[in-house]
Image (cartoon, grey):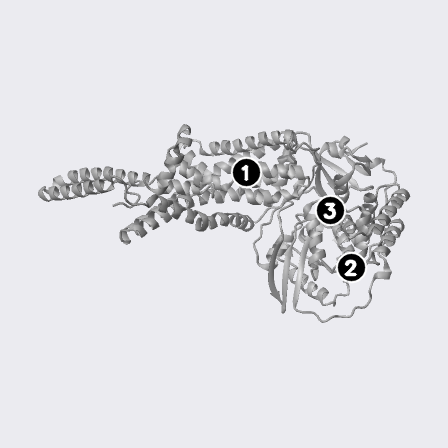
Amino acid sequence: MTLAELTNGQEAVITKVKGHGAFRRRILEMGFVRGKKVTVIKNAPLNDPIEYRILNYMVSLRRAEASLVEVVHFGDASVAVEPLYYGTDATTELTEKTPELKDKTINIALVGNPNCGKTTIFNYASGSYEHVGNYSGVTVDIKSSSFSYKGYKFNISDLPGTYSLSAYSPEEIYVREHIRLEMPDVVINVVDASNLERNLYLTTQLIHLDVKVVIALNMYDDFQKHGDTLDYRHLGRLLGMPIVPTVGSRGKGLVKLFDKVISVYEDRSPDSRPVRVNLGKTLEAGIQKIEELILEHEELCVEIPPRYLAIKLLEQDKEYSKLIKKRTYENILEQADLQRHKIEHENREDIETSFTDARYGFIAGALKETYKENPIKRRKTTDAIDNILTHRLFGFPIFFFFMWLMFQATFTLGQYPMDWIESGVGMLSSWLSGVMSKGSFKDLVIDGIIGGVGGVIVFLPNILILFFFISFMEDTGYMARAAFIMDKVMHKIGLHGKSFIPLIMGFGCNVPAIMATRTIEDRNNRLLTILINPFMSCSARLPVYILFIAAFFPEHPGTLLFILYGTGILLAVLVAKLFKRFIFTGKDHPFVMELPTYRLPTLKAVIRNMWHKGQQYLRKMGGIILIASIIVWFLGYFPRESSSSEALKAQIETVTFGYKSDLALLDEGQTELLAAQRDSELRKLGEQLHREQQEESYIGRLGHAIEPLIRPLGFDWKMGVSLLSGIAAKEIVVSTMAVLYQSAYQASWF
């Protein structure tokens, strides 16, 4: 019987995991090992993928992958598979340490599973405001900061989340190589207290790396709410690393955490000691044989801990195998192959299963001595919410309604502050027009800078509202659910369910969205997601959309905006289908994704994330858009003389002088009518002068040169130049139009 054959609510015990390669390694590392209990939660609205609970957390698998996991019904499992717990090797435990003279700078690396709260601790400790979210893959590269505490300088680095230190994904290689090459003084292993068994798998691999580790037992308040108990001090002694309970979101326990870091750094912590996880007689014998050969090469021992390298070679790690082959240590590789075949023959299972079982066995044994689960089972809030948001019938309508609501709110709520900013820009222009003396500098400030930048900054409220909704989706955990319900649809067009999150992030900005694709393990799917991401309408296009919708479709702005974004998605789907058919023709990669617990974010956190993204837009205001507005103004302002400018200026002077003399002869009642006639005539002449000067300016000449190409589209030369300027940044289209489409009176001609 396989996992895919179970129905909703059924429980089973895993007996065997089939399959090969990276997928098999990944689900083994995530806890799908022999003897573990697994529960079917629900099927996605389109019957694929399926959500399971294992090791007290949620994970989704496609039906095809679930069919590779053999199980028996929980009631039929007459004999539970006992974990193989061999403890630690006492011969390597040091009972006494000699403190060394240290400097006052401590380099720290924050390491942990995705979504365990690393970045939250990083922000709170360092005073930074890096983006956090309730789904995996938020930290897309290393973040570094420094702070001082108790006379020590802490250089702290927040590394991407990873489930293990294998070579399965780019972030796993990145994290382990950072630890190996940068050699931080102390590693803070952030562990989600509600998912101990899964999180401690990474901890066992950090033990192999032979680094000083302090465990931050994060989200400890949630753990206590569930009524579970943990003797974390005893667990720390078993692991050879001190454990400090923390609540990163509120800063609780962080003082004790960094006190413990200092203690470990100064070799004053009795709980911090070298520990060797005993992986069992068969594995240990093979490791020892390889380690003996590695120890013969001193340069290898300096670069990589010998035991860690021996384990990696047994696991057929490609990166380390290449390293050994490059150094021409063929005898080490031959010994690794020999020992691997010997172990697989004795254990009658592949080497990956043997190592995974041994590590989880060690974790289970350590927790058996220290952890006690609350016997009273309470229905989790996450399950209740999921029953609605990922429902077979309601899941898709709720998702599409939320997306429509996001675009509708972007227009309706954003209209009020948009009008206020527009009025403010107008009042500023009028005030400056009255106080500044006439000349080119006045025209630059009012027409170039305020006209250009002001034409774009009015859309800031709309963009902030869009970012508010995206931040809310990220922080609550709904973003991962959206990927879950959309996986089958994505699969039909040749994409991965995980591709959906970077695509939705593309509504904010394509750059971080493309960076977020690193969480997609398969190279083809990752490249395909990157290539279609520009079809997602980012925030830079929003001002252009709003401008046209307000001009041509003012009755239903939210619906039209939804259709525009939907059209981009449809084009992305069509292109993805074509690329998958003719370019990326490889086999689809399995879908394995953790579904995090729902968390109600604080308003402060959502607004901070919203503002963090909105700042990028504001930086553009003071940077590229300001520069572009000045350049466009300059090209449209010079040369000042046109072929008929002198004649028009003379005509303006004649009209002005003529009306002035006529007004002097009339009584007060007749002057208003004559003044209105004068203003109308001067306005027409001013418009004509402004138009001719602009058409013969540098930008006018460029516009007329490209006009034959865009005339079939119904665009004039001003529209063509505006579109051309959008190559630098999409928002510049609006600022260019704001500068070029000014009337003579708006352009401060009088």
Please tell me how crowded label 2 is: few (under 14), some (14-19), or many (20+) other residues with Cα within 10 Å. Answer: few
Q: Viewer-proximal residue, 135 or 74?
A: 135
Q: Earlier in the sequence, mark 3 or mark 2?
A: 3
Q: Viewer-proximal residue, 589 or 710?
A: 710
Q: Which residue is mark 2?
A: 299
**Label 3 amino acid?**
Ala
| Direction from residue 243 to residue 411 in the image, left or right | left
Rendered location of residue 424, percent (x, y)? 36, 48
Instruction: State the separation of the CA atoms marked 3 and 1.
Output: 29 Å
Residue 99: which numbered mark, if any?
A: none
Q: Viewer-proximal residue, 75 or 706?
A: 706
User: Which residue is rendered at x = 53% and y = 40% of the image?
Assistant: 507
Question: On the rendered image, what quadrant is the N terminus found in?
Answer: top right
| Direction from residue 134 to residue 435 in the image, left or right | left
| Direction from residue 294 to residue 248 in the image, left or right | left
CB under 8 Å between callouts 3 and 2? no
Indicate whether 293 appears above or below 515.
below
Q: Which residue is mark 3?
A: 167
